[in-house]
Image (cartoon, rainbow, N blue to C red):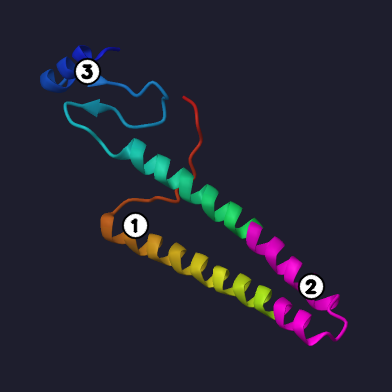
């Protein structure tokens, strides 16, 4: 569909269906449903990847701690690694709650399960 057809649809109020099949119908105005789905999918992916990286970082810190063999410098480095992982966990949990608060204020559900396709 070209730009002129889109302009005609938005000015006449005709219906234009999203070709992906999972967003709302646009009727003479734009909707944010597609954008909300995109942001929701992005945030879910980031949280999942962040959680996996956090787990790996904690395991790495624990292995460093166990292999320190009493060396004070290596123990301090391992503790710093574990502390950094826990700070990352706090940041992820905090951002999750900020997103949930924004959902309530804006009246949208960002973390709604989304399936692609018609």
Q: Position of residue 17 (x, y in %)?
A: 31, 22
User: Could you tell me what secondary structure mostly forms the magenta stretch?
Assistant: helix
Relative depth, front residue between 92 and 105: 92
The location of residue 77, given as percent across then percent down, is 71, 78
Residue under pointer 3: 6
| Relative height, residue 1 to residue 86 (above, below) | above
Residue 108 point in image, percent of width and height: 32, 51
Q: Position of residue 67 (x, y in %)?
A: 86, 75
Q: Is residue 69 left or right of residue 81?
A: right
Which mark lies nearer to you, 3 or 1? Answer: 3
Which is in the foreground here, disc 2 or disc 1? 2
Query: Does the residue at mark 3 contact the one at mark 2 (Cβ under 8 Å)?
Result: no
The region drawn magenta spans 53-78
Residue 65 belongs to magenta span: yes
Say left or right for 104 vs 5: right
Return the residue at label 2: 64
Q: Secondary structure at mark 3?
A: helix
Count of all numbered marks drawn on residues in the image: 3
Q: Is residue 31 above or below residue 65?
A: above
Name the residue that disc number 1 marks. Answer: 103
Q: Is residue 32 left or right of residue 12?
A: right
Q: Secondary structure at mark 2?
A: helix
Q: Along the polypeptide, which appears first: circle 2 or circle 1?
A: 2
Residue 104 to residue 5: above or below: below
């Amino acid at each position: 569909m070209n730009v002129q057809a889109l302009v005609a649809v938005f000015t006449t109020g005709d219906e234009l269906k999203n070709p992906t099949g999972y967003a709302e119908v646009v009727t003479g105005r734009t909707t944010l449903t597609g954008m909300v789905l995109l942001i929701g999918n992005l945030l879910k992916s980031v949280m999942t990847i962040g959680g996996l990286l956090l787990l790996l970082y904690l395991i790495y810190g624990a292995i460093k701690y166990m292999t320190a063999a009493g060396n004070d410098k290596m123990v301090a480095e391992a503790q710093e690694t574990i502390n950094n992982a826990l700070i990352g966990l706090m940041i992820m949990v905090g951002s999750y709650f900020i997103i949930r608060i924004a959902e309530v204020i804006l009246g949208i559900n960002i973390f709604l399960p989304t399936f692609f396709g018609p």
